Image (cartoon, rainbow, N blue to C red):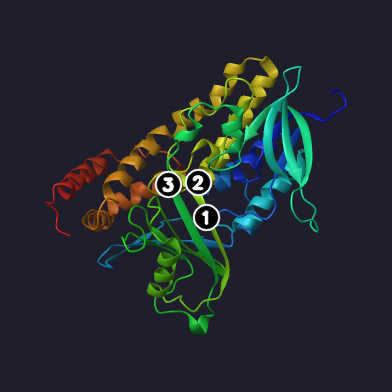
């Protein structure tokens, strides 16, 4: 066994969480294998806030569009435009963005390998073994089996993580999911754009016909568009919803470039580690924000924190170090997740509540505080009187006293 490849850390999954973890670990001089499946792109609106761009040094050329306005559309088709004052939300194509992150990890010293994770086992000396399969481009059927040893494993293999399940992470089966689906369309040429089309605006549909418990979106991506939706209702047709959304937004005839779907977790797992040598990050850890569905920023923060926890384990040998990833994440963002969870549970519960939710968003105080919190990734505590005004306005809407 001593002649087998042994890495300090094997990172399973090359999305934003896994690629960020691999980059941080390699940058700190650790031997890292980044294992990723080929050809899979997660359905995602592709929005990244300025905080992510700054913290993770994302170059401007990766931004295929810059959204400067969000349009919220109520069940009655009432529209509320929320300008993004003095800033923008960056839009990225996930295939290009994720690959750039993986390349950056490799440049820092991580070894990249394409393969499908199969299972975990343990050698007689207690070191974990990661089993995976490699499939040649021309081959059919099962891939060639391979294995490497790992002192620590970062599971960034998405929702329903096999690393979490096989690694024995307690509570890994308890995650709640929204099933997301989107279609990437070619943006119509200027002469064929529907009325009201704006390549710098994100449209968000809070309408039950597009999702009974989430929302639908039309997000600009420069030469393309992402049109998608999500729902936890397994009987709801996501494809049918997207088709209706395309018709409603005048994009029914736009060319479809690809279709993608996947489960998206809506609540952080109660544990992110197995108490020995596995720590989770990204969708595997359940860090997609409720209500908004935002995941890229939280995935990258989670990947960085997972890397820090792995480094602590490797340096000290203390398995309790792996708990630090979740502890630090929840300290930074737990309150936001709880607030957003309550928002989704209440405001998305009926058409009447969705209508009131969009109405609240007409308020300038709500707009400013919401975007300040979104852009900076922390609850805004400035302007205390604005919070007081919002509180009483919310109470009015909750009690049905406010006019819609």
How crowded pointer 1 is (Cα within 10 Å; few <14, some 14-19, many 20+) is rated as many
Query: What SS does tag 1 mark?
Result: loop
Residue farthest to the bottom?
A: 191
Residue 152 appears in the rendering: yes
Q: Is residue 48 something one can see in this rendering?
A: no
Q: Which label's residue is closer to the chain start, 3 or 1?
A: 1
Mark 3 vs mark 1: in front: 1
Name the residue located 80 percent from the left edge and 56 percent from the top edge. 139
Q: Classify 10 Å Cα crowding around label 2: few (below 14), some (14-19), many (20 and above).
A: many
Task: Residue 83: give x, y in percent of width and height.
Answer: 38, 60
Residue highlighted by disc 1:
44
Q: Disc number at residue 118?
A: none
Residue drawn at point x = 33 percent, y = 56 percent: 212
Label 2 belongs to which residue?
Answer: 295
48 relative to 70, above or below: above
- Label 2 to label 3, Cα distance in Å? 12 Å
**Which percent across, then down, holds residue 119?**
67, 35
Instruction: Kindly indicate the quadrant of the structure image that contains residue 337.
Output: top left
* Front position in the image: 395 or 132: 132
Q: CA distance from mark 1 to mark 2?
A: 9 Å
Along the viewing direction, whichever of 171 and 94 lies nearer the viewer: 171
Q: Which residue is mark 3?
A: 374
Q: Secondary structure at mark 2?
A: loop
Q: Dot 3: within a 10 Å radius of its alpha carbon, few (fewer than 14), some, or many (20 or more) residues?
A: some
Looking at the image, residue 270 sits to the left or right of residue 315; the answer is left
Q: Is residue 300 above or below residue 317?
A: below
- Residue at disc 3, secondary structure: helix
């Amino acid at each position: 066994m001593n002649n087998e490849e042994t890495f300090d850390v094997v990172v399973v999954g090359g999305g934003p969480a896994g690629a960020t973890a691999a980059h941080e670990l390699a940058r700190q001089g650790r031997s890292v294998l980044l294992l990723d499946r080929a050809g899979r792109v997660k359905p995602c609106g592709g929005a990244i806030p300025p905080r992510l761009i700054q913290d993770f040094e994302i170059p401007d050329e990766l931004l295929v569009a810059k959204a400067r306005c969000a349009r919220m559309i109520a069940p009655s088709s009432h529209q509320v435009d929320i300008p993004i004052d003095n800033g923008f939300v960056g839009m990225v194509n996930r295939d290009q963005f994720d690959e750039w992150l993986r390349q950056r990890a490799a440049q820092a010293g991580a070894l990249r390998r394409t393969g499908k994770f199969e299972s975990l086992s343990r050698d007689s000396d207690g070191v974990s073994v990661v089993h995976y399969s490699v499939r040649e481009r021309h081959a059919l059927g099962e891939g060639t089996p391979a294995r490497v040893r790992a002192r620590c494993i970062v599971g960034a293999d998405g929702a329903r993580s096999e690393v979490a399940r096989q690694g024995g992470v307690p509570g890994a089966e308890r995650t709640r999911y929204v099933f997301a689906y989107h279609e990437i369309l070619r943006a119509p040429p200027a002469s064929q754009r529907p009325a009201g089309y704006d390549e710098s605006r994100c449209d968000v549909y809070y309408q039950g016909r597009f999702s009974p418990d989430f929302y639908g979106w039309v997000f600009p991506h420069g030469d393309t568009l992402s049109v998608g939706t999500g729902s936890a209702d397994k009987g709801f047709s996501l494809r049918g919803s997207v088709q209706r959304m395309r018709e409603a937004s005048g994009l029914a005839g736009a060319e479809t470039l690809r279709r993608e779907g996947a489960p998206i977790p809506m609540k952080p797992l109660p544990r992110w580690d197995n108490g020995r040598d596995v720590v989770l990050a990204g969708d595997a850890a359940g860090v997609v924000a409720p209500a908004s569905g935002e995941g890229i920023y939280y995935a990258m923060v989670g990947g960085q924190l997972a890397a820090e926890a792995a480094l602590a384990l490797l340096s000290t040998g203390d398995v309790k170090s792996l708990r630090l990833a979740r502890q630090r994440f929840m300290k930074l963002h737990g309150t936001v997740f709880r607030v957003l969870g309550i928002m989704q549970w209440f405001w998305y519960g009926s058409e009447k509540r969705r209508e009131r939710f969009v109405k609240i968003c007409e308020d300038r105080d709500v707009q400013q505080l919401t975007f300040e919190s979104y852009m900076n990734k922390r609850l805004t505590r400035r302007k205390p009187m604005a919070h007081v005004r919002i509180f009483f306005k919310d109470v009015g809407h909750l009690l049905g006293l406010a006019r819609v």
